[in-house]
């Protein structure tokens, strides 16, 4: 089952650049700013999630627990909207590969810190030297994706 979840995570990573390109195209087609394109994208996502909730029998009565949420639990939607906004804004400015490399590098750095300290109720996972080297390779990859061509042109 773990292999399935690893594969699922990889597949999600495969579609993030596609989503960014689609949202960037949406912004251009609407001839609007990134905020409106992100709003349309989020609206479609909301309808899709509501439909999936109905199809899978999610207990919508659980929404009565919303008033008990901590203030920081509301930030997930805000952060998601910020992500969609950013992936709508950035592709034409820095390119999909550069944007994605930096997003992945940022995700790995933040994730390792959160794992290490068990923030927000996550299980604590130590940062081994192997994981640290992996993160450093990802950071190096992000630097190369963003600046490698310029460095090679100078040589």
Image (cartoon, helix red, strand yellow):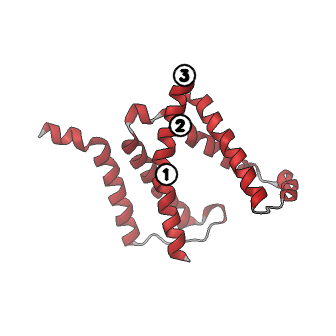
Distance from the alpha carbon under mark 2 to that under mark 1: 12 Å
Q: Earlier in the sequence, mark 2 or mark 1?
A: 1
In this view, the residue in front, 52 or 70, is 52
Which label belongs to residue 23?
2
Q: Secondary structure at mark 3?
A: loop
Marks 3 and 1: CB-CB under 8 Å? no
User: Residue 153: where, in percent of width, then height?
Assistant: 16, 38
Q: Give the residue number, with chain letter if any, for mark 3.
A: 31
Distance from the alpha carbon under mark 3 to that under mark 2: 12 Å
| Mark 2 crowd level (few <14, some 14–19, many ≥20, 10 Å Cα) | many
Farthest left residue in view: 155
User: Residue 77: where, in percent of width, then height?
Assistant: 68, 46
Q: Secondary structure at mark 2?
A: helix
Farthest front residue in view: 55
In the rendered image, which quarter is residue 123 located in?
bottom right
Q: Earlier in the sequence, mark 3 or mark 2?
A: 2
Q: Earlier in the sequence, mark 3 or mark 1?
A: 1
In this view, the residue in front, 102 or 38, is 38
Q: State the residue at coordinates (51%, 44%).
A: 19
User: Residue 125: where, in percent of width, then height?
Assistant: 53, 72
């Amino acid at each position: 089952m773990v292999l399935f979840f690893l594969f699922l995570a990889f597949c999600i990573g495969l579609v993030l650049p596609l989503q960014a390109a689609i949202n960037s195209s949406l912004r251009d087609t609407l001839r609007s700013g990134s905020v409106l394109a992100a709003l349309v994208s989020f609206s479609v996502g909301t309808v899709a999630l509501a439909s999936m909730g109905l199809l899978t029998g999610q207990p919508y009565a659980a929404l009565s627990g919303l008033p008990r949420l901590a203030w920081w639990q509301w930030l997930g939607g805000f952060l998601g909207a910020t992500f969609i906004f950013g992936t709508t804004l950035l592709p034409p400015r820095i390119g999909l590969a550069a944007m994605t490399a930096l997003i992945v590098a940022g995700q790995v750095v933040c994730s390792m810190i959160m794992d290490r300290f068990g923030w927000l109720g996550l299980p604590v996972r130590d940062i081994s030297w192997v994981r640290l080297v992996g993160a450093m390779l990802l950071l190096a990859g992000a630097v190369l994706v963003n600046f490698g061509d310029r460095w090679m042109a100078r040589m």
